[in-house]
Amino acid sequence: GSQVLDRICEEILPRINNKINKLTLDQHSIKSTLRAIVYPQLYSLSLVNLQPDTLLPYLTGNTKLHYLLTNQITHLDINIIDRRTTALNDENESEIFSLILSTGKCLTDLTFRQWFRCTNSRISIFYMPSTSCVSSTLTKLNINVDTFDDCLYILDGRLDSLSVLIINIREISTPLSNIDNTKQLRKLKCFSLLAYSRTYFYDSRVVPLLCRMSNLEELTLYLAITRIESTYIDGTHLYDGILIHMPRLTKFNFCINTLVFNKDIINLPSNNDIQHSFVKRGYQQIDSYTHKESEKGSTCHIYSLPYQFDCFYVNCHFHGGIFDKVQCVMMGEIEHPFEHELFQIISHSFPFLHTLVICNYQPQKRKQHSSTIVTFPYLRSLDLQRTNVDYGAQFLCDTKIHLPSLLNLIITYESLAMITNNFTNHMTRLTCARLQRLIICGSYVLPENFHLYFPSCYM
């Protein structure tokens, strides 16, 4: 606790302060660690699990952190945890980002990540003054932002030494401004774009941006795309529309899921066609699967191997593999149910799965599951709010699926009450008793026996 930290700061750090190059601090250790000790060789600083209102005074006052940022720190990693339980604006986070850039006179490498309990919002560069967010030294930026416009603003010249941009965008949607998306970005050598929300604006916004990166050497794309009266994204499209403009490209990692609505106007390629479109361009290490769902749309999932992302999208046509970097799986299906056999495949394919989100309202057809119990040893979070009750009955019953690490569950009250037989079902009691966080969707009045059934839960 605090006594151990005090002893480290008083007895150990003063002896080795001249040899310390890197420090990792949280909001409990930042004050005492930086208070009275000089670190002349310190160049890399990581600040983790900080509240915005805790960090802000350290950046605005006459503090040791302010001095280090101004005179020494070249590598900075900021991890903000915003535990507000109501949706407020994110002005503090945006101000922190702006202050870091203006203060960090030596800064070359910045990672700025935020996690919000109440929303999935990110900071927005778009709404900040054009004179802020300026740096002449920064060469690498890793950041989560709100919209695609924020990405364009980051690349508009205000960070004129930037050569590496790793950006996670909440939403790629309608343009908020007339910002130029045509000027060549010749200094950019590495670009990583992750956008987990589905977008209709891939062709009109993302492709023009990528075509500006003529000197790019490394490209990473994680996209979920919807196209109308068009076809799947395949190797031919990627090469002819994007990669041909990047003659220096040596590394390309991608995971692209395309949902197409075209009313059979365009004949969609088969899975073999998709794979051949990559092979003929020299890309051997890829995999794909396609699924036609009549007027409800058709999907195609293409991804490079070995798979480099921590998130993966699955439908009923997933045929397996080994994805040891994946921690989050999103399962979605409109017409077909997910059966027990598919969950067996998923448990083997994603050995370190941490979060599972299931979206499927189709009831299972084979409810007499096999005698094989499926185990997800590391699964901590399960989202069942958009599912048929069958999936909750399967996952919460310890004799069907074993979830020894499950702590967080999102589910509707109607499903939860039905699965647990109004919180009396012994078959689901063991899994429910281990839960620590329960988010219940829909209106409800909790019965008296509810907390006995979930003794470790907070809501």
Image: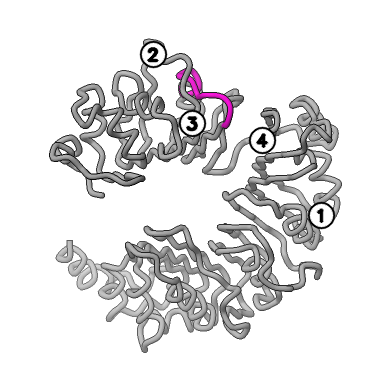
Rounded to the nearest angstrom, the CA distance separating label 1 from label 3 is 43 Å
What amino acid is labelled 4 in the image? Answer: His
Which of the marked residues, 2 or 4, is nearer the chain's N terminus? 4
What amino acid is labelled 3 in the image? Answer: Tyr
Q: Residue at x 41, y 40 (%)?
A: 385
Relative image position of residue 104 (x, y in whole percent): 51, 79
Given residues 279 and 146, the one toward you in this image is: 146
Magenta-highlighted residues: 334-343
Occupied quadrant, residue 416: top left
Label 3 sits on residue: 361
Numbered circle sitting on residue 372: 2
Magenta stretch, main secondary structure class: loop
* Mark 3 residue element: loop
Above or below for 129 versus 17: below
Label 4 sits on residue: 301
Above or below for 8 versus 262: below
Rounded to the nearest angstrom, the CA distance separating label 1 from label 4 is 23 Å
Q: Is residue 388 left or right of residue 427?
A: right
Residue 435 in magenta? no
Q: Is residue 4 left or right of residue 294?
A: left
What scheme was used to colour the molecule? one colour
Label 1 sits on residue: 246
Q: Residue at x 80, y 42 (%)?
A: 230
Relative image position of residue 271 (x, y in whole percent): 74, 26
Rounded to the nearest angstrom, the CA distance separating label 4 from label 3 is 21 Å
